[in-house]
Image (cartoon, grey):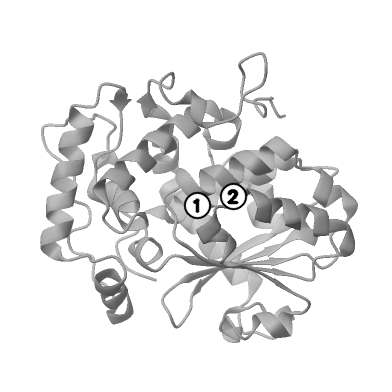
Amino acid sequence: MASGTDHNTKQLSVVKCPSQYEANDIGITLAEVHRTIALQELGETDERREASLGAFRKWIATHPHIRRCRTDALFLLRFLRARAYNLQAAQTTLERYLTMRQLFRIWYENLDPNDRYMRELVENVRGCLPLGLDRAGRMVVLVKVRSYDVTRFNCYHLGRLQHMLFEAFFDDVAVQIAGGVAIIDCDGATMGHFVCFKLSDIRNFMDCLAHALPVRVKEVHIVRLPRIGQALGNLVLSFAAEDLRKRIFFHASMDEVLKHVDQELLPVEYGGKTCPEEITNGLRQRLASKRDTLLLLDRMEIDVEPYAHWWRQSDEGDVEFGMEID
């Protein structure tokens, strides 16, 4: 894992024009694979990074609708790297990100690792396992659909867990530069797993993934999708942006997936060398170290009115999945 993931969160703030900006990317040593990707795929150089950060910060400081926002280097580099240093695209993504967090509060607010549901999902259910970096420097994540008891956890619990994990890794330079690979194992999934998400949930999430989340999705491997889930798979594809659609692959067996990922990263039950208990312990420690940063995100604010039209809303004017959960 790249260094520099546990910065002192006391230095971070959401003042959009602070007296001094936090350069928390200083001193991070990149592996050779990530230096190469940063230059060849993102066009990142020291000079371009500094100039882009300066322009980005100036834009935020004078933005008429952004009220509070993180301006530290690692936060803004999420967006610059996700958009290959296209500054205008990075700015639009930030606007969407801030708006999305306020419109879809049930997904994004209070992403607290100490929440009883989040703690249980991480420590006991273990349905989403960050496996580490592959030879190409990408973060590989395994999702085991069958692990989630849909009589206990609804789509909002699962969505919040996913976004909490996203945020816990977004400041990691390896993830920012090389992106991630997801393996979604649908073996043993039931009808309940496929009907817990509404049509609007899927549509809005795919739109957020494409336009508002600063994440570089390199590949998504959906394996052993049962017949009852094929309709949902087709919906996901229909809502995905064209660029993302090209990166989603369906496989009949894990043997096919192994052509794309390093087998040793997988848990022992998949023929790999990774111990799920060790992954869970490491994830628990990361979330604990990131808790203050996760909660700080709720203090960011944008005037959503100019941007609310980006997402589908109900006739009452409320975002469709704005319900409360226990």
Q: Quadrant location of residue 45?
A: bottom left
Q: Residues within 10 Å of mark 2 (few under 14, many from 20)?
A: some
Q: Position of residue 282 (x, y in %)?
A: 52, 64
Q: Position of residue 64 (x, y in %)?
A: 25, 21
Check disc 1 and give the amino acid type: Phe
Q: Residue at x 43, y 22 (%)?
A: 304
Q: Residue at x 24, y 40 (%)?
A: 71
Instruction: Look at the numbered disc 1 and give the secondary structure of its residue.
Output: helix
**Residue wearing tag 2:** 162
The reply to whether the C-beta atoms of the residues labelled 1 and 2 are less than 8 Å apart is yes
Quarter of the picture containing the C terminus is: top right
Instruction: Look at the numbered disc 2 and give the secondary structure of its residue.
Output: helix
Quarter of the picture containing the N terminus is: bottom left
Asked whether, in this view, residue 236 is left or right of residue 74, the answer is right
> Can residue 80 be seen at all in this image of the molecule?
yes
The foreground one among 154 and 184 is 184
Q: Report how far apart the C-alphas of labels 1 and 2 lie in the structure.
A: 6 Å
Q: Position of residue 279 (x, y in %)?
A: 57, 68
Q: Quadrant location of residue 3?
A: bottom left
Q: Look at the picture and state if 160 lies above or below 176.
A: above
**Residue wearing tag 1:** 166
